[in-house]
Amino acid sequence: NTEYLKSITIAYEPRMSNKDDGGVLEDLQPHGNLEELHITCYPGLRIPRWAREDGLAASLPNLVKIVLEDCDGLKELPWLGKLQHLKTLQLRWLRNLEYI
């Protein structure tokens, strides 16, 4: 049961091909009680479907901390503005990020 899980870290192999769309993250649907999400070396070009638009704010309403690092494929993070309870945002080495 994941309802008691407050923090999750997902770390991809740094040399993973960009052709992998980050299927593990796509299939993950964290419990709504999650407070911290840390993703490293995500190879996808877009965030998972469950997190797009209002999805992340709706599915993870208690999220207070997000750390994204070495996610070079990500170009846009427009959904960040929808997270009303977010207190900590760390974006590290998102070399292709163009829009938040």
Image: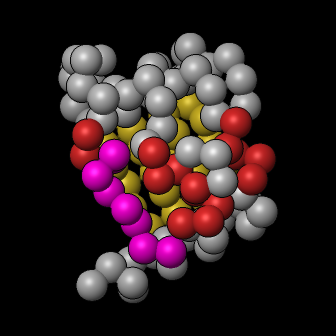
Residue 88 visible in the displayed image: no
* Side of 79 relative to 21 (left or right): right
How many numbered dots are placed on residues in this image?
Answer: 0
Q: Residue at x 50, y 74 (%)?
A: 32
Query: Residue 27: within the magenta?
Result: yes
Counting from the top left corner in percent of width and height, residue 37 is at 48, 57
Residue 44 visible in the displayed image: yes
Q: What secondary structure is the magenta-colored segment mainly? A: loop
Counting from the top left corner in percent of width and height, residue 73 is at 45, 20
Q: Is residue 54 above or below residue 61?
A: above
Q: Nearer the viewer, residue 78 or 36?
A: 78
Quadrant (top left, top right, bottom left, bottom right) of the N terminus: bottom left
- Magenta residues (range): 25-32
Colour setting? secondary structure
* Side of 52 relative to 48 (left or right): right
Q: Residue at x 39, y 77 (%)?
A: 5
Q: Is residue 100 above or below residue 57?
A: above
Counting from the top left corner in percent of width and height, residue 39 is at 42, 44
Q: Is residue 95 above or below residue 92?
A: above
Q: Nearer the viewer, residue 75 or 13?
A: 75
Q: Residue at x 72, y 57 (%)?
A: 83
Quadrant housing residue 60: bottom right
Q: Residue at x 47, y 30 (%)?
A: 46
Q: Nearer the viewer, residue 26 or 18?
A: 26
* Side of 45 relative to 96 (left or right): left
Quadrant (top left, top right, bottom left, bottom right) of the C terminus: top right
Q: Is residue 84 above or below residue 52?
A: below
Quadrant housing residue 64: bottom right
Query: Residue 28: within the magenta?
Result: yes
* Side of 64 relative to 33 (left or right): right
